[in-house]
């Protein structure tokens, strides 16, 4: 369940991120490239990789920690790049958004590291 949810979410992030990239190319306006990059990498790539690990290792996805990890990562994967985009366009008034977003992502990836250390021994 958690595994397919994360892989599906990752694939959706990638479609949105690629359309965003095409839009930047058409308009020849690349100021939001860092937000596009983090949307694709943290949202698209990482969510998909986490989903694959949860598919490969059932014990990893069955813990309550995995639900926290997935929820936090999902929130951070949106808040961080959207916050970066807002700061690029509007200035540093809302710098708190990417700061909180990045900390949420770090927390989620730390939880993932804990899950991997607990479950990856062959
Ligand atoms: C249809 C697919 C995509 C298109 C059309 C696209 C388009 C672009 C464009 C126009 C830029 C700005 C280039 C510049 O500033 O000169 C860019 C930057 C970037 N993109 Fe994409 N992109 C796509 C998919 C992806 C994916 C899947 C990833 C990562 C998984 C990615 C990661 C990046 C990175 C790391 C940068 C550099 C950001 C920076 O310089 O701040 N892109 N992309």
Image (cartoon, rainbow, N blue to C red):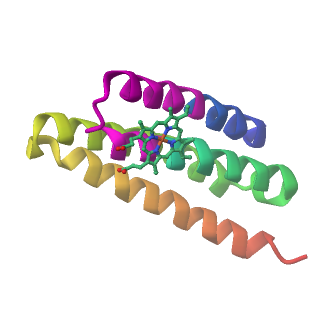
Residue 94 visible in the picture = yes
**In this picture, is 116 found above or below 48?**
below
The picture places residue 13, in percent across and down from the top left corner, at 56, 33
> Is most of the magenta stretch helix, strand or loop?
helix
Q: Residue at x 61, y 28 (%)?
A: 12
Residue 85 placement (x, y as % from top left): 27, 37
Above/below status of 108 relative to 101: below
User: In screen coordinates, is 114 left or right of 104?
Assistant: right
The x, y position of residue 57, in whole percent, is 85, 58
Identify the residue shown where x is 73% and y is 47%: 51
User: Is 63 or 89 nearer to us in this picture?
Assistant: 89
Q: Position of residue 2 (x, y in %)?
A: 73, 41
17 relative position to 93: left or right: right
Q: Quadrant of residue 81?
A: top left
Q: Magenta stretch: give its range.
A: 14-39
- The residue lying at 36 percent from left, 55 percent from top is 102
Q: Is residue 6 left or right of residue 14?
A: right
Q: Quadrant of the C terminus?
A: bottom right
State which quarter of the image contains the N terminus: top right
Q: Is residue 62 visible?
A: no
Q: Does residue 101 appear left or right of residue 99 in this picture?
A: right
Residue 112 lies within the magenta run: no
Given residues 68 and 57, the one toward you in this image is 57
Hey, which residue is sitting farthest right in the picture? 122
Residue at 20% across, 49% down: 96
Please say if 20 is above or below 1. above
């Amino acid at each position: 369940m958690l595994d397919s949810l994360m892989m599906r979410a990752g694939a959706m992030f990638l479609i949105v991120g690629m359309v965003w990239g095409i839009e930047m190319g058409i308009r020849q306006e690349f100021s939001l490239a860092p937000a596009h990059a983090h949307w694709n990498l943290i949202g698209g790539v990482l969510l998909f990789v986490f989903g694959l690990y949860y598919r490969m290792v059932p014990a990893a996805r069955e813990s309550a920690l995995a639900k926290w990890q997935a929820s936090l990562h999902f929130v951070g994967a949106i808040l961080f790049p959207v916050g970066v985009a807002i700061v690029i366009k509007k200035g540093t008034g809302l710098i708190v958004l990417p700061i909180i977003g990045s900390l949420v992502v770090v927390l989620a990836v730390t939880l993932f590291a804990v899950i991997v250390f607990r479950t990856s021994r062959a």
